[in-house]
Amino acid sequence: MKVVFLDRDGVINEFPGNGNYVTKVKDFYFVPKSLEAIRILTEAGFTLFVVSNQAGVGKGIYSHDKLNRITHHMLKAVKKAGGKIKKIFYCTHRAEEGCRCRKPKIGFILEGLQSLNKTIRTAQNTFFVGDTKIDILAGHNAGCKTIFVLSGREDRWDIRKWEVKPDFVTKDLLEASKIIMNTNDCPSFRPTKP
């Protein structure tokens, strides 16, 4: 099974800055080449999910309706570019609520996998692409191969302090898509050092 989980902010669209949220469609800017990457993975037969923490809703900074409008805008552009995202999972809870769906917990990863096949219980042979320690930890906790992209919140220097390191480090989602294409069907997969 060919499955890729993507974080949103910093991977698909530009990260709005620490403490900030994308609250309007006009503030949603795609990371260069991210639409191309999604198209490439779609054409290669990968099933794509987005798993994103969006606590701004829980904090009352923006509404579910605004989040839905941003999502509609994103999916419309993805489709126009030739890509497809099967489902988007948003955790809108605040960190202190301790829900099972907020990364680095893996509730949404498992839900995505189980929507494809009721017998799947782990994310073996799947990828998680993210731009933060939390993303890499979520992917690791679920058993995914992890790819850290440098197009978002954290950078290469931050990795040195992490207990859990990503399997790969790439410039952006397009570069990550090339790694995914080259390693997903390889039984002798060996992670490279970041």
Image (cartoon, rainbow, N blue to C red):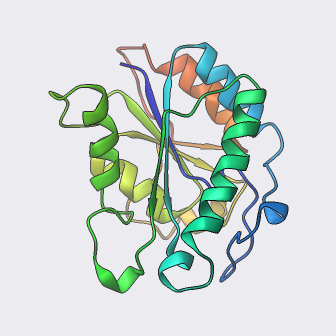
- Residue positioned most to the front: 65
**Relative to 192, does residue 50 appear above or below in the rendering?**
below
Can residue 10 be seen?
no
Query: Residue 162 at what x, y percent from top left?
Result: 45, 66
**Relative to 142, does residue 152 appear above or below in the rendering?**
below
At horizontal 60% and vertical 66% (from top left) the residue drawn is: 65
**Relative to 92, does residue 52 appear above or below in the rendering?**
above
Whether residue 18 sits left or right of residue 36 in the image: it is left
Query: Residue 157 at what x, y percent from top left?
Result: 64, 66
At horizontal 44% and vertical 34% (from top left) the residue drawn is: 191
55 vs 68, nearest the viewer: 68
Whether residue 78 sits left or right of residue 139 in the image: it is right
**Relative to 66, does residue 188 appear above or below in the rendering?**
above
67 vs 140, nearest the viewer: 67
Which image quarter: residue 94?
bottom left
Query: Residue 133 at what x, y percent from top left?
Result: 49, 64
- Residue positioned most to the left: 119
At horizontal 14% and vertical 27% (from top left) the residue drawn is: 119
Q: Quadrant of the N terminus?
A: top left
Query: Residue 77 at what x, y percent from top left?
Result: 76, 38
Can residue 79 be seen?
yes
Which image quarter: residue 60?
bottom right
At horizontal 84% and vertical 43% (from top left) the residue drawn is: 32
Whether residue 7 sits left or right of residue 150 in the image: it is left
Whether residue 34 sits left or right of residue 147 in the image: it is right
147 vs 32, nearest the viewer: 32
